[in-house]
Structure formats: C-alpha cells, structure tokens
Amino acid sequence: MYEYIKKEGALIWVIPDGYIPEKSKGELIGHEALCVLNMNNENASLKLTVYFENRDPITDFDLIIEGKRTKHIRLDFIKNSKGEKIPKGVPYAMKAESTIPIIVQHSRMDTTQEALTLMTTIAYPINLGNRN
C-alpha cells in the first residue's frame, strides 16, 4: 500500500478537489498551492491539466522543478502557454504529469471566513515511479 513512499515518487498525481475563492476576508488572500519535491539529480518537467464540471480542460501549464529541490507553486499565479489562468470561484480538478518521479502535496488557504483554514494533503499518485 505504501510502496510509493519507499520508491520516492510517482509520475502522475491527481488532485480531485480544487477551488480558488473569488473573495477573501482579512489580510490574507485565499489560494491553493502545489508543493513539489524532486529528490532526483536531474530536473523534472511538470505538465498540469485542469479539469472542470462543464467546460473543456485547460492544458499546457509547463513548469520545471530543479533536481534535489522543492518548488511551491501558487495556483492563482500560474498561466499556461496561451496566457490562461485557473479561474476563481469555479470547482476544478488537476492532473500533474512529470518526466521523472516526484512527490506532490496540495494545500488550500481558505480565507472566505474570519476563522481561517489551512488544508493540506498528499495528492493521489497514479503511476508509481522507480518500480523494479
């Protein structure tokens, strides 16, 4: 069951619940982020696809995660190759595909209420990396 932890990553990760709020209360801005850990020596090319309930996916979010590094990606800041952003106030899901095994964590800062919430979870690994 926990083989992917021992094998240090997967090639494909899925986040089924995404939502960037339109408005925030207080000083902090509500957002979501991916934290990607690349424990390999070489760089990882990461491609994100964003899925919606009632429209076609947004594709071509391309990122590089340097070898032996972590990268925190604010999902409300990134743009794809066409300049498109993930829309606010719309539920979405995401697939992250890497050229080499990585670890992906998803976090949400919910500031829609005065009592702030920070939620974080490991994304769901689809294709286990480093399988022997």
Image: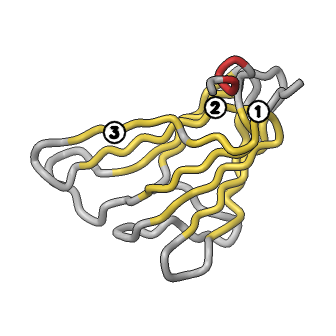
In this view of the protein, which residue sits in the foreground, 52 or 68?
52
Res. 112 mark = none
Label 2 amino acid? Ile
Residue 125 sits in quarter? top right
User: Which residue lies under the disc numbered 2?
Assistant: 103
Residue 31 shows up from this direction? yes
Quarter of the image for the N terminus: give it: top right
Residue neighbourhood size for the residue with mark 1, other residues' Cα within 10 Å, grouped as few (<14), some (14–19), many (≥20): many
Drawn side of residue 46 relative to residue 20, left or right: right
Residue neighbourhood size for the residue with mark 3, other residues' Cα within 10 Å, grouped as few (<14), some (14–19), many (≥20): few
- Assign a secondary structure to mark 3: strand
- Assign a secondary structure to mark 2: strand
User: Which residue lies under the disc numbered 1?
Assistant: 101
In this view of the protein, which residue sits in the foreground, 42 or 121?
121
Residue 35 sits in quarter? top right
x%, y% of residue 89?
34, 69
User: Which residue lies under the disc numbered 3?
Assistant: 119
> Coloring scheme of the render?
secondary structure
Q: How far apart, in angstroms, are the residues tagged by discs 3 and 2?
A: 17 Å
Decide: is 32 above or below 18: above
x%, y% of residue 26?
14, 48
